[in-house]
Image (cartoon, rainbow, N blue to C red):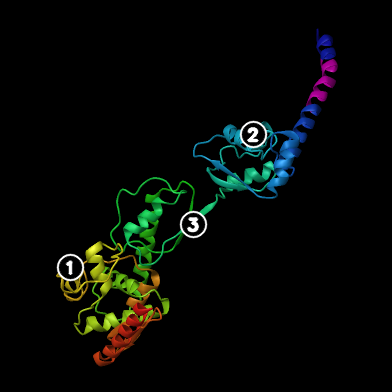
Amino acid sequence: MGRIVSGLIRLLRPVAVVGIIASCLVAAGGWMVFTAPGPGNLPGGDEAIVRLDEAGDNPQIVMVEQGTGLAAIAAKLEEQGLISNALVFRLGVMLSGQASALKAGEFEVPRRASMAEIMRLLVEGRSILHRITIAEGLTVAKILRQLDEHPQLSGTVENQPEEGRILPETYLFTRGTTRAELVARMVADHDAVLDALWETRQEGLPLATKEEAVILASIVEKETGIASERPRVAAVFINRLRRGMKLQSDPTIIYGITQGEPLGRGIRASELRGATPYNTYVIDGLPPTPIANPGRAALEAVLNPPKTDELYFVADGTGGHAFASTFSEHQRNVKRWRRIERQRAER
């Protein structure tokens, strides 16, 4: 009996060796395919080659939804022509120990990326970043409308932040980020910037709280669109507050009428006299809330204004303002501006 078993082992041993060698050759061939540069394979033979030539070297976008498994990812990559064989991709990922490490997201895959490179791209989660720029001086309502119009964002914002709580900035995000998540980031960034600037504020400011600083910064933001003027405008308002003078800011009147939407006409004399909480021609000090969302520069200008004795400013016809320290000087600047207005109306 023992001789029979030994004979069978001697007989089968070459077969097993051949099988092992064959398996290794298959695995080696598969690994070569997995690591070789990918031609950006598109199904369809010669027609596919023509489409690739027309596409040039442009990368292709692959969207991997949250919860998508390895098999589905491999099938999608093969369907989009980025890999030649879904099974080889699956086996390569599994042999690399990365089957559970592939991340969801929107990925830009180079046309000739190898399967191994695509795997690394998904493992590292290098998802495409989209951007949105929030301009200084917008109201919360306008910012939310801007977010609603961005196609790469999802969901709605149920809890609208208070006016002035959003930091105008350029924000990067991945496709599918919710609008609520992005708004939360904007609010957190505002709070962080305000906290830092408040700690280094100028001593003796007529601003008792951070909220008051934001209110004044929002007025500064709406009064001038010229970055270099912000500190000077802030200094005028700080000087007026110190002297107990009314701010007399037109944008506060408009906010009281429209909540920050365009007025579409000039301010009427009756509106200058109207007793609303936002009419700084009537009320003392600051209005009850910000009238827009100020940027970092406006906040800095309010919390560290330059030392000046200026108390007035009026448009100068160039897009900027003429500043004055005395009322008589201011009246001359106003007359000059009225003359410019009349000349423009006559053209």
Q: Quadrant of the N terminus?
A: top right
Q: Position of residue 227 (x, y in %)?
A: 42, 76
Mark 1 or 3: in front is 1
Residue 172 seen in this snapshot: yes
Which amino acid is tagged 1?
Answer: Pro
19 magenta-colored: yes
Q: Position of residue 180 (x, y in %)?
A: 37, 50
Is 141 on the left-hand or right-hand side of 55? left
Dot label at residue 277: 1
For marks 1 and 3, the one nearer the N-term is 3
Q: Residue furthest top?
A: 1
The residue under the point 31% across, 70% down is 218
Q: CA distance from mark 1 to mark 3?
A: 37 Å
The residue to which callout 3 is attached is 131
Dot label at residue 72: none
Q: Position of residue 125 (x, y in %)?
A: 56, 48
Where 308 falls versus 265 (above or below)? Answer: below
10 Å neighbourhood of mark 3: few (<14), some, or many (≥20)?
Answer: few
Is 78 on the left-hand or right-hand side of 188? right
Q: Position of residue 275 (x, y in %)?
A: 14, 70
Could you say which is closer to the camera, residue 291 or residue 298? 291
Which amino acid is tagged 3?
Answer: Arg
The residue to which callout 2 is attached is 90
Main SS category, magenta section: helix
Point out the stretch of residues depicted in magenta: 9-20
Q: CA distance from mark 3 to mark 2?
A: 33 Å
The residue under the point 82% across, 13% down is 8
Where 243 falls versus 121 (above or below)? Answer: below
315 magenta-colored: no
Where 64 falls versus 282 (above or below)? Answer: above
Which amino acid is tagged 2?
Answer: Arg
